[in-house]
Image (cartoon, rainbow, N blue to C red):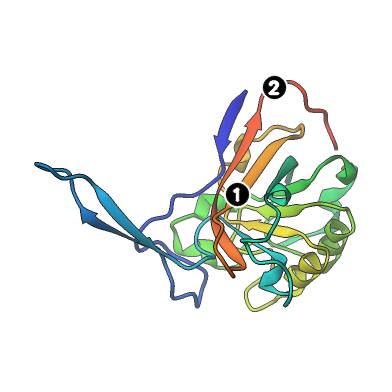
Amino acid sequence: MTLIDLSHPLATGMAVYPGDETAPVISRLSAHGEGRHQSSAFTSGCHAGTHIDLPLHFRAGEPALEDFPVGRCEGTAVALDAPEGAIPPAVLAGVDLAAVDFVLLRTGWARHWGAPQYYRDWPWLTEGTALLLAEAGLKGVGLDGPSIDPFGVETAHHILAAAGLINIENLAALDRLPAVPFRFAALPLRLAGAEASPVRAVAWVGDGGGRRVG
């Protein structure tokens, strides 16, 4: 079995979602030397890098991270190829969504990570696709771009949040995932009162136990 890291590294000065002024900062408080050790500090917005959005992001009264069941952040997943631009319902054709907990949409957009294009005209879910995913009884949906909605739009976020799904955004290395279901986890920090958190998203593949879902 192989463990695949699906996360981008967090770094000082990295680009974040347009309009977000809370980019990560990693500060060195002390360094190795005579009688010394390395110690660092980290500050960041909750939506930086590879992260999850809870339903609380768009729905008042939903659980924050300290009360959100961690079991809803892991399970069986399938990676599906999707186009750039609007992601239509057709990408889900022939897929047994009842057999998985998460759908990860592989658009190839992660190739722009670190370049200005990454936060311009990224792939996003159409309303029809969001509705199909919301009705499937999933735990969550992820993709290799900045958001499930285009800039300035919240339609897909509201649809998935109303169904209790989490979103995993800015995923990496989805091209390394197989055509059969695999184990997936995107575990957040337990931040009191928060609606989102950076995650170390991972997939376990290669155990030979998966079956094709589409």
Q: Image point 60% across, 67% down: which residue? A: 121
Rendered view: 86 above or below 61? above
Judge from the rendering whether residue 8 lies leftward or rightward of residue 195; answer left or right.
left
**Residue that extends furthest to the left in the rendered view of this protein:** 34
Q: Look at the picture and state if 206 lies above or below 162.
A: above
**Count of number-bearing discs:** 2
Q: Amino acid at mark 1?
A: Leu
Q: Quadrant of residue 194?
A: bottom right
Where residue 12 appears, as percent x and y from the top left, is 34, 60
Q: Provide the secondary structure element on which disc 1 rests.
A: strand
Q: Are marks 2 and 1 in contact (CB under 8 Å)?
A: no
x and y percent of residue 32 in the render? Answer: 17, 43
Q: Give the residue at x 20% y 44%.
A: 37
- Quadrant containing the C terminus in the rendered view: top right
Between 156 and 87, the one lying in front of the other is: 156
* Mark 1 neighbour class, 10 Å CA radius: few under 14, some 14 to 19, many 20 or more: some
Task: Report the side of 25 relative to 153 (left or right).
Answer: left
Per the image, the residue denoted by label 1 is 187
Determine which residue is flagged by label 2: 207
Q: Who comes first in sequence, dot 2 or dot 1?
A: 1
Q: Nearer the viewer, residue 126 or 102?
A: 102
- Farthest-out residue, top: 208
Please indicate whether residue 145 sits to the left or right of residue 100 in the image. Answer: left
For the N terminus, which image quadrant? top right
Residue 92 x %, y %: 84, 49
**Residue in view at x 68 percent, y 63 percent:** 54
Between residues 158 and 192, which one lies in front from this camera angle?
Answer: 192
Callout 2 crowding tier (Cα within 10 Å): few <14, some 14–19, many ≥20: few
Residue type at the position of mark 2: Asp
Under circle 2, the secondary element is loop
| Residue at figure coordinates x 57%, y 56% from the top left | 170
Residue 118: which disc?
Answer: none
